[in-house]
Amino acid sequence: MNTNLFDLSGKVALVTGGGRGMGRFICEVLAEYGADVVTCGRTKERLDETVELIKKYGHRALAIQADVTKEDSLKAMVNEIVSKFGKIDILFNNAGTLPLDYPIHEIPLESWEETMNTDLKGVFLCMKTVIPVMLQQKSGNIINISSITGLKTLDRELAPLAGYFTAKAGVDILTKQAAAEYASQGIRVNCIAPGRIRPTAISAERKKRWSPERVAQLEAARLNRIPARRFGAISDLKGAIIYLASDASSFVVGHTLVVDGGETI
């Protein structure tokens, strides 16, 4: 019996946006299962806090201040990782942003562009920068974080977030295309699409924009759409993270793993 199917010992993982919320949780999960973890983001202090959490698992950890929307920044980061760790086995594209709520005809162009830059261009640039390392290794595993909002629409009252939805849908198809291009060269590419996960740093920030009454109204409407009749906890993502990061999913290619309590069925 293989009892080490989920073992990541000896693996080097890079997690973008690891300074808080879901990114920090991903870092901890990977470290718990044996990986050395590098995390990047814009705020060094938050990244350093994540590194201290990773070190508690007894593995190597590194924080690098980098901007996923800047190719030069990513190239410098990848060069530093390869110099210090020798390889990159796993890339978790988690960094993202969530814009203010606007109906399509009122979306400021700068808001649309910021969302596309971080949530879609950032994923593309990270893949573009890391894939050459994986090609040289003849192995690699890329997991992109999408969202169920890339798979379905929501009415205006619940979430007028066309830019965010469009970017996440782009991540899904970029995942499939990358999987098709690189699977024969030892690189797997898959995606996790979380549903309503509470709490995350981004969801907490969004709630600050509304009155308590508005928050209660929206949450009740959203809860009614989930067959499981509860919101997800961030711990509900743990199985999906370790499954796609490990050899347990060695024949899973180009898949979007939905974790949403049944909301998209």
Image (cartoon, helix red, strand yellow):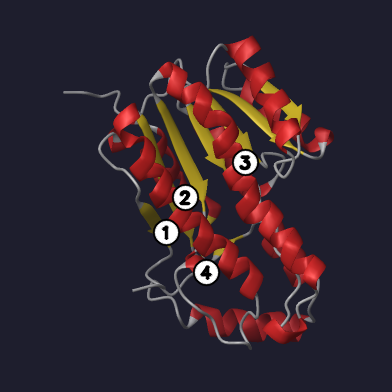
Q: Nearer the viewer, mark 4 or mark 3?
A: 3
Earlier in the chain: of badge 4 and badge 1, it is 4
* Label 3, residues with CA under 10 Å away: few <14, some 14-19, many ≥20: many
Real-space Cα separation, disc 2 to disc 1, in angstroms: 7 Å
Check disc 4 and report the residue beneath it.
Answer: 149
Q: Secondary structure at mark 3?
A: helix
Residue name at image x 41 percent, y 41 percent:
189
Q: Secondary structure at mark 2?
A: helix
Above or below residue 244? Residue 114 is below
**Which of the two residues, 6 or 120, is positioned nearer the viewer here?**
120
Check disc 1 and report the residue beneath it.
Answer: 259
**Which of the two residues, 33 or 128, is positioned nearer the viewer here?**
128
Earlier in the chain: of badge 3 and badge 2, it is 3
User: Residue 180 bears which disc, if any?
Assistant: none
Earlier in the chain: of badge 1 and badge 3, it is 3
Question: Can you give x and y, in whole percent of width and height, for residue 151 in the image?
Answer: 44, 69
Check disc 3 and report the residue beneath it.
Answer: 125
Earlier in the chain: of badge 2 and badge 1, it is 2
Question: Can you give x and y, in whole percent of width and height, for residue 257 in the image?
Answer: 38, 54
User: Type of residue at label 3?
Assistant: Leu
